[in-house]
Image: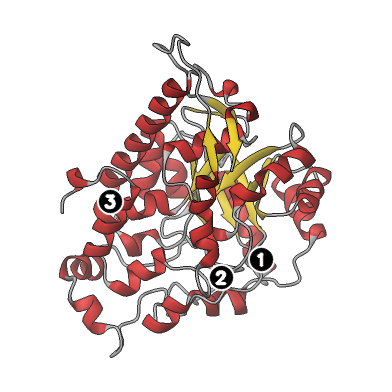
């Protein structure tokens, strides 16, 4: 199977599965507990039908939106994800360059494998930093100040990871950051020598946004669950969020909002945007899908704050359904991580191009020429 054989996100997933050691693939692909919520995130889109108009004159269409003060060529965002150079040696560099090429927002994680400063130097496109609040207040302050100096466009405070979800695939494989080879998983790594050579012979693994303050996860192997459970601040509350917004002083987003009440609180503390997200089903299994919860949150705060529907997006029509239901934009992580793991920057660019084509084709088949015409009357709920 080659990159040219990938015609949708499911194809990229299969190519990534073939090319990655199974512990690494399972880290990307897996979720919490029974992985019910992960499955719901995508299945939720199947419960809604699009209602097209015809004879609408769609020779010219405009897919652009303004999101958090910056233009995006598509109503699609590449969500921040951690540890990307574990999946492919190009890591965040590939994603940054692909996002700039297509004019999209993208984000990097506190647990990124490329620094804040290098990421900023790679692209003039819109970019956000996903902040995990650590117990080490000096580390939190350092990351915020580095984002200010590097002129990041937004900080997204992650609010759904005060403890780690139970990621059973990672428990079985013994996956750590950086990867640690054990008797249990050694064969899985050895069977993918191309990945192994890239990992061992290219740039040394590190987490450069953290390694000035902590060894865990960068120089010292630790499970992601262990890292979250020991390093992150479980006392974080709404006052913490307001304080971080004030420290940052720029465009501010809350990532992981799932209730209408929390969306209302986000408006009250002056957030510019929220990402309706359950962390890709990796935290609270049995929680609602973001798309299922979208209408309730739009009814509560629509028009007062920008709303990004994050998770489960695998098709251009999923983006269109999100906008019809009231979202400002849709976003996802696995939709480009599979492609990154499969083929680096070339893979990410092909995945974005396929989604771009699906969005454009879907808009034309729906009889709309601009994103603002994607309204609730174009949806029917089963």
Q: Nearer the viewer, mark 3 or mark 1?
A: 3
Residue nearest the viewer, comparing 90 with 187: 187
Residue 205 % position (x, y):
35, 67
Q: Residues within 10 Å of mark 1 (few under 14, many from 20)?
A: few
Q: Residues within 10 Å of mark 2 (few under 14, many from 20)?
A: few
User: How far apart, in angstroms, are the residues tagged by discs 1 and 2?
Assistant: 8 Å
| Screen quadrant of the N terminus | bottom left
| Screen quadrant of the C terminus | top right
Q: Residue at x 56, y 42 (%)?
A: 152
Q: Nearer the viewer, mark 3 or mark 2?
A: 3
Residue 169 visible in the shown view:
yes
Q: Are marks 3 and 2 in contact (CB under 8 Å)?
A: no
Above/below status of 78 relative to 174: above
Residue nearest the viewer, comparing 40 with 20: 40
Q: Earlier in the sequence, mark 1 or mark 2?
A: 1
Q: Is residue 135 left or right of residue 228?
A: right
User: How far apart, in angstroms, are the residues tagged by discs 3 and 2?
Assistant: 39 Å
Q: Residue at x 82, y 58 (%)?
A: 239
Q: Earlier in the sequence, mark 3 or mark 1?
A: 3
Q: Is residue 168 left or right of residue 299?
A: left
**Residue 203 falls in which quadrant of the image?**
bottom left
Above/below status of 277 relative to 363: below
Coloration of the structure image: secondary structure
Residue 199 % position (x, y):
26, 67
Q: Does dot 1 land on a helix, a strand or a loop?
A: helix
| Residue topped by disc 1 | 138
Residue 76 visible in the shown view:
no
Q: Does dot 3 land on a helix, a strand or a loop?
A: helix
| Residue topped by disc 2 | 213
| Residue topped by disc 3 | 11
């Amino acid at each position: 199977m080659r990159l040219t054989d990938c015609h949708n996100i499911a194809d990229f997933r299969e190519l990534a599965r073939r090319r990655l050691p199974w512990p690494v693939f399972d880290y990307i692909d897996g979720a919490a507990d029974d992985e019910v919520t992960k499955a719901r995130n995508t299945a939720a889109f199947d419960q809604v039908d699009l209602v097209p108009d015809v004879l609408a004159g769609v020779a010219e269409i405009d897919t652009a939106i303004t999101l958090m003060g910056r233009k995006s060529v598509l109503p699609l965002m590449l969500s921040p994800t951690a540890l990307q150079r574990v999946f492919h040696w190009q890591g965040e560099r590939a994603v940054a360059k692909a996002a700039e090429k297509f004019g999209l927002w993208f984000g990097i994680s506190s647990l990124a494998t490329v620094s804040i400063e290098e990421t900023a130097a790679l692209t003039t496109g819109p970019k956000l930093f996903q902040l995990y609040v650590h117990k080490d207040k000096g580390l939190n302050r350092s990351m915020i100040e580095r984002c200010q100096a590097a002129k990041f466009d937004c900080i997204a405070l992650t609010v759904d990871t005060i403890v780690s979800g139970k990621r059973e695939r990672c428990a079985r494989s013994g996956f750590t950051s950086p990867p640690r080879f054990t008797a249990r998983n050694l064969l899985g790594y050895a069977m993918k020598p191309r990945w192994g050579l890239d990992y061992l012979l290219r740039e040394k693994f590190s987490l450069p946004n953290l390694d000035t303050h902590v060894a865990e996860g960068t120089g010292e192997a630790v499970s992601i669950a262990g890292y979250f459970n020991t390093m992150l601040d479980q006392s974080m509350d709404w006052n913490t969020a307001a304080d971080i917004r004030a420290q940052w002083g720029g465009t501010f987003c809350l990532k992981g909002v799932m209730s209408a009440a929390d969306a209302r609180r986000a408006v009250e503390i002056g957030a510019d945007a929220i990402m309706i997200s359950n962390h890709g089903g990796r935290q609270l299994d049995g929680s609602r899908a973001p798309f299922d919860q979208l209408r309730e949150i739009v009814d509560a705060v629509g028009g007062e704050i920008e709303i990004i529907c994050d998770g489960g997006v695998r098709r251009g029509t999923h983006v269109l359904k999100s906008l019809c239901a009231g979202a400002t934009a849709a976003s996802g992580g696995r939709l480009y991580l599979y492609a990154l793991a499969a083929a680096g920057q070339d893979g990410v660019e092909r995945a974005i191009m396929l989604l771009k084509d699906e969005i454009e084709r879907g808009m034309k088949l729906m009889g709309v020429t601009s994103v603002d015409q994607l309204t609730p009357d174009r949806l029917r709920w089963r």
